[in-house]
Image (spheres, rainbow, N blue to C red):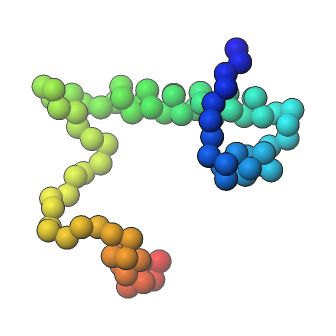
Amino acid sequence: MQLTIEIDDKLAQEFFSLVPEKKRSFYVSELLASHLSFKKKIETSDIKKGNERKLPFEVLPARGTMGTNELINQIREQEGV
């Protein structure tokens, strides 16, 4: 099957520089199959409770501070990451 999609220019340029032209179709198919398989795995492993789904991570309570890039960078500097 042939499909036309729009991709961000920078992403397309990087993809084209990394993947030989003859293998591009194969790589796109493999990436899509891998993503769909992963997504289905997460959806089927969700524990349903009524209409709510249990997320695969713990949601922390709000502390009144918005997480910004500046705050994250400050924490990284403090932690030496």
- For the N terminus, the image quarter is top right
Front one among 47 and 22: 22
**Viewer-nearest residue: 19 or 9:** 9
Task: Report x, y in % for residue 34.
Answer: 58, 32
> Which quadrant of the view contains residue 31?
top right
Residue at the image position 78 percent from the left and 45 percent from the top: 16
Q: In the image, is 58 to the left or to the right of 23?
A: left
Q: Position of residue 23 (x, y in %)?
A: 82, 33
Q: Is residue 28 visible?
A: yes
Task: Estimate the x, y position of residue 46 in percent, counting from the top left.
Answer: 30, 31
| Residue drawn at 24 percent across, 51 percent down | 58
In the image, 45 versus 71, the foreground residue is: 71
User: Residue 20: x, y in percent?
Assistant: 85, 41
- Residue 30 appears in the rendering: no
On the picture, is 43 further left or further right than 13?
Answer: left
Relative height, residue 57 to residue 35 (above, below): below
Residue at 17% x, 32% y is 52
Q: Residue at x 85, y 37 (%)?
A: 21
User: How many numbered marks appear?
Assistant: 0
Above-or-below relation of 73 to 53 = below
Q: Is residue 46 above or below residue 2?
A: below
Relative to 71, is 30 above or below? above
